[in-house]
Amino acid sequence: MEKRPAVARLLEAFASERARLEALVDRRLRSAATTADVMQESWLKLAGLAGDVSVDNPGAFVRSVARNAATDHLRKERRRSVIDEEVRDLLWDGADAHSPERIMIGRQALAAFAEALAGLPPQSRRIFLMNRFEGKSHREIARELGISEPAVYYHVRRVLEHLAVLREHLPD
């Protein structure tokens, strides 16, 4: 193995493999703009690695980082899509979705939702928003906040139970 720092070798491998990496990521994402974002995210992950990282095959490692970043992006998009659908169903189900009455009901429901979130303990609210609106997994949140995954699950469940009570009082 060479004496150059591992991070420098990884960034050189990233630069030399860039076209191949972009093709790999673009095949998964099918969007030039998203591919560019994921490529930048991959580079940042590599640049942020500790200096004492030991990698025998920098090219394979770099491909793995890019592939995982693309997969993470797809997973977050799926979560966002599910959340969007849930919100749409909650607020706008029915044929009269754009009637003035439905719009008013939707605004009231949104205000009640915002008020309910504001009344939660800050830690629970933060964890819920990270999970449901930023699309982060329980593991990512636990790592970021320095708490256990079961604690993250507890907070999310607690908020969902709180919001379920609110939903019972909303008009249909």
Image (cartoon, grey):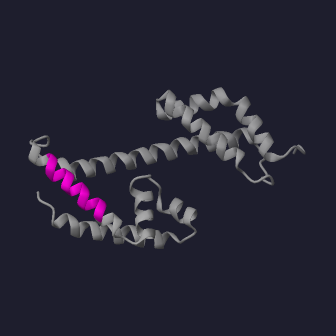
Where 36 falls versus 10 (above or below)? above
Q: Which residue shows up at 15% across the image and 46% down it?
A: 103
Q: Position of residue 87 (x, y in %)?
A: 26, 51
Residue 126, by quadrant, is bottom left
Q: How many discs appear?
A: 0
Q: Which of 120/97 is in front?
A: 120
Q: Position of residue 22 (x, y in %)?
A: 59, 30
Q: Which residue shows up at 22% across the image and 67% down it?
A: 166
From where the camera sits, is residue 93 visible?
Answer: no
Q: Which residue shows up at 53% across the image and 65% down it?
A: 142
Side (left or right) of 81 relative to 44: left
In reply to whether residue 154 is colored magenta, the answer given is no
Where 163 falls versus 107 (above or below)? below
Q: Which of 164/12 is in front?
A: 164
In which quadrant will I find the C terminus?
bottom left
Q: Which of 78/131 is in front?
A: 131
Majority secondary structure of the magenta segment?
helix
Query: Which residues are drawn in magenta?
Result: 103-115
Q: Position of residue 111 (x, y in %)?
A: 25, 57
Side (left or right) of 146 relative to 115: right
In which quadrant will I find the N terminus?
top right
Where 30 falls versus 92 (above or below)? above
In reply to whether residue 113 is colored magenta, the answer given is yes
Q: Which of 165/150 is in front?
A: 165
Where 51 falls versus 30 (above or below)? below
